């Protein structure tokens, strides 16, 4: 767990630097469309280091995540025909995908909202939303509410319980990291077997 401690300490150090807000924006943007690491890995230490900026950081993460979500949506719209559709046809799953598409249009807002709040890989939902051409207004509202809800709750908890929360995180960093990765990997398994 020495590597995890070094990463955590580095994030705390970066959170106080001049480029911290830009790095947070970049990670939140990328995570919504192609990058595997969630922005919480930057957001949490940044808020712990500068709790007076918690709301601004949560807003930045929300805006970047929603903009990144549009990029993921675009991947789904523009690359589906070139990449995914031929594969679905080849494996005989195109009809199943069309059933999924109907289901997604009925429950899409809830799917986007649920995935935006949880450790579930949000990029999968943004790309899927574009692939099925989920109504962009529905996608936007669900994304803003979910991502904003997630980041502002984290900001509120850390702002309110910052010192004890920082102590708790530092004492339990090892098993919290394991729990995070179990949830992340579990999300991939849920997706695979749905």
Image: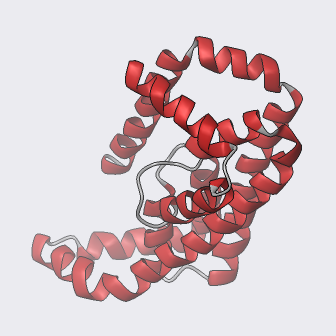
Residue 192 in the image: x percent, y percent? 31, 49
Residue furthest out toward the left: 90
Taking 27 as reference, is 178 left or right? left
Note whether residue 66 is visible.
Answer: yes
Q: Residue at x 88, y 30 (%)?
A: 160
**Residue found farthest to the top:** 171
Q: How many marks?
A: 0
Q: Nearer the viewer, residue 76 or 2?
A: 2
- At which x and y percent is residue 130? 47, 79
Direction front: furthest residue: 18
Left or right: residue 192 compared with residue 157: left
Question: Is residue 153 placed above or below 110 in the rendered structure?
Answer: above
Left or right, 47 with reference to 87: right
Question: In front here: 76 or 56?
Answer: 56
Question: Residue shown at 70%/15% (left/top)?
Answer: 167
Task: Give the answer, above or below, for where 169 lies relative to 146.
Answer: above
Please state, as top left, top right, bottom left or bottom right, where the N terminus lies in the image: top left
Relative height, residue 134 to residue 184 (above, below): below
Q: Is residue 118 visible?
A: no
Residue 132 location (% of width, % of height): 45, 79
């Amino acid at each position: 767990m020495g590597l995890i401690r070094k990463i955590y300490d580095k994030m705390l150090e970066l959170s106080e630097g001049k480029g911290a807000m830009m790095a947070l924006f970049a990670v939140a943007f990328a995570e919504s469309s192609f990058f595997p690491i969630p922005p919480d890995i930057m957001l949490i230490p940044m808020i712990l280091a500068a709790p007076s900026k918690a709301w601004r950081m949560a807003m930045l993460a929300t805006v970047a995540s929603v903009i990144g979500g549009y990029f993921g949506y675009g991947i789904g719209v523009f690359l589906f025909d070139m990449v995914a559709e031929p594969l679905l046809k080849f494996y005989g799953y195109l009809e199943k995908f069309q059933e999924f598409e109907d289901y997604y249009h009925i429950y899409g807002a809830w799917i986007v909202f649920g995935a935006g709040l949880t450790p579930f890989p949000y990029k999968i939902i943004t790309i899927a939303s574009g692939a099925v051409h989920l109504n962009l207004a529905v996608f936007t509202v669900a994304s803003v509410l979910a991502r904003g809800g997630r980041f502002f709750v984290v900001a509120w908890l850390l702002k309110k319980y910052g010192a004890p929360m920082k102590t708790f995180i530092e004492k339990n960093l090892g098993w919290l990291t394991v729990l995070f990765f179990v949830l992340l990997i579990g999300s991939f398994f849920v997706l695979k077997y749905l």
